[in-house]
Amino acid sequence: FQLALAELGVEQNVITFTESEFSRTMNASATNGSDHAWGGHHFVMGGAVKGGDLYGTFPVLGAKNATNNNFDGSPNQLGNGVLLPETSVDQLGATLGAWLGLSSSQLADIFPNLANFEAGRRNLGFMR
């Protein structure tokens, strides 16, 4: 796909990315596997991407409290091992939207949750 884009001369104009709020907990469920949770890793690919780096903040993992099902040593782990993501899909979308030329006010209309993030964290900075 990337080679075809390069051959057409549009590799700087096309971005491919994943988007999902689906993930797994850090606990095994009663059956095989783990329970559903929030957040996950995403890929952003294309000629205009500042590649070769990781963007966002990885969660702090803690040990499970022996007296309950909480992870007291981690601000990012909720009960049952659910990880609370620190980087939102809204930030991913706003970063791509800014690259497409949307203004700050347009991004705020499209992604109203951006107001929950510091101004410097609304654009993740992975686009050229």
Image (spheres, grey):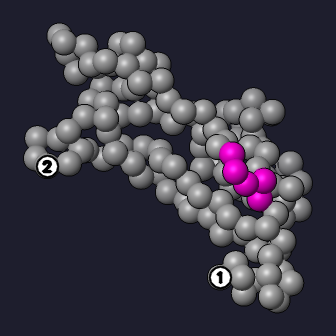
> Mark 1, mark 2: which one is toward the viewer?
1
Residue 125 makes an appearance in the image: yes
Helix, strand or loop: magenta stretch = loop
Most foreground residue, 33 or 113? 33
Viewport quadrant of the N terminus: bottom right
Measuring from the top left, give residue 125's x and y in whole percent.
Answer: 79, 45
Packing grade of label 2 (10 A; few <14, some 14-19, many >=20) is: few
Above or below, 41 relative to 86? below
Where residue 27 appears, x then y in whole percent?
25, 34
Viewer-proximal residue, 49 or 17? Answer: 49
Checking the image for residue 65, the label placed there is none
What amino acid type is highlighted by mark number 2? Asn
Of the numbered discs in the image, which one, if any, rests on residue 1? 1
- Asked whether residue 21 is drawn in magenta, I would say no
Q: Is residue 116 above or below residue 9?
A: above
Taking the spot 74% from the left edge, 43% from the top edge, the residue there is: 124
| The disc label shown at residue 32, or none | 2
Residue 5, image quadrant: bottom right
Pointer 1 with pointer 2, Cβ within 8 A: no
Residue 24 position by quadrant: top left
Question: Which contiguous range is marked in magenta?
Answer: 49-53
Give 53 or 76, whichever is nearer the viewer. 53
Query: Which label's residue is closer to the chain start, 1 or 2?
Result: 1
Residue at far left of view? 31
Residue at left 41%, top 33%?
83
Q: Quadrant of residue 81?
A: top left
Q: What residue sits 70% from the left and 33% below the top?
A: 117
- The image position of residue 97, as x and y in percent, is 78, 59
